[in-house]
Each structure stands twice: as C-alpha cells, then as structure tokens.
Amino acid sequence: MKKQSKQEKKSKEIRKLKPSQRPKKRYIKFSLSGAEISSKDKLQNLLWLGLVQEAGVSEAKKFFIKVIEFKQGKGIVRCALEKAEDLRKILPKINEVEDKKVKIKTIKTSGTLKKLRGYGGHRHKKILGN
C-alpha cells in the first residue's frame, strides 16, 4: 500500500469555501394572515408559485428562497442578497392560497437570523443608567 503525499490528499478533498466567497443571503421576517397554512412545506410551495407568477420560472430560480421557520402566522424566509428587495415587493402581491384570500406583510429584513429573532445587536442590550 502506497502512502499518499499531503498534496495528493488535498487534491482529493472537497474544499470548503471561505465565508467571504460564499453567496450572500438575506432573511426576511413576515406575517401572514387570512388562510391557515399548517407547514413550512406548504408555505414554501406558496412562495415558489407566487414568485413564478410574478417573475417567471427562470427568474424565480435566482431567488434561492427557503422558509427557515414558520409559526402562528409569522415566519422567516431566506433569499439571495441581490433579490431581497424584489422579494419584498413580490410578497405583498401574493394574495390567494387555495381559493382563500391571504395577506403577506414584510416586517423586517436582516443579514442574520439573530437580529430577526430579537436577540443580538446593540439595540437589544440593556442600557444601564445612573
């Protein structure tokens, strides 16, 4: 059995991208009222269909949307940095789910989940006064 050199091992390994080289993402917090949606998967399909109707299939693929969490009518969706503003404009235009009226309102956009969930950042630190 022949020993592998360090160079051969490195060439066979899958290299991870540095954080600076990874695609940038944005997280959008939203509220949904009107229809009852029971799971993240149904919401994911709803958002995908809304994107396809508004932007077309080829453009919708560039959004890279994924529902991160969804509870009690509020949720967080992840998308590509370049498409965050477009998604914020498209979300309120989605107004029908399974023949029921729906209203989606964006609450906040952030680059991190910590800030959207309400902990982290300088605004949330307790200020001690004299």
Image (cartoon, rainbow, N blue to C red):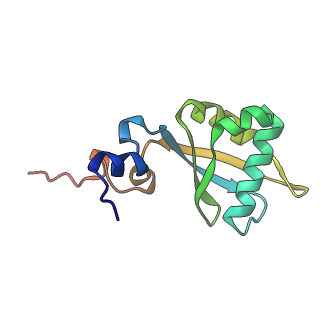
Measuring from the top left, give residue 116's x and y in whole percent.
45, 51
Q: Residue at x 91, y 56 (%)?
A: 99
Furthest-right residue in this view: 99
Camera-side residue of 126 and 118: 118
Q: Residue at x 44, y 39 (%)?
A: 22
Q: Quadrant of residue 34?
A: bottom right
Q: In which quarter of the image is residue 59?
A: top right
Q: How many marks?
A: 0
Q: In this view, does 114 lie to the left or right of 123?
A: right
Measuring from the top left, give residue 29's x and y in whole percent.
55, 49
Q: Is residue 119 left or right of residue 108?
A: left
Q: Quadrant of residue 86?
A: top right
Measuring from the top left, give residue 13's x and y in whole percent.
40, 52
Furthest-left residue in this view: 130
Q: In this view, does 122 lie to the left or right of 27?
A: left
Q: Which residue is drawn at 65% across and 61% down?
A: 73
Can residue 9 be seen from the camera position used here? yes
Measuring from the top left, give residue 52's x and y in whole percent.
80, 39
Camera-side residue of 19 and 103: 19
Quick one: quadrant of the N terminus?
bottom left
Seen in the picture, residue 41 relative to 105 is either above or below; the reply is: below
Q: Residue at x 58, y 35 (%)?
A: 84
Can residue 15 be seen from the camera position used here? no
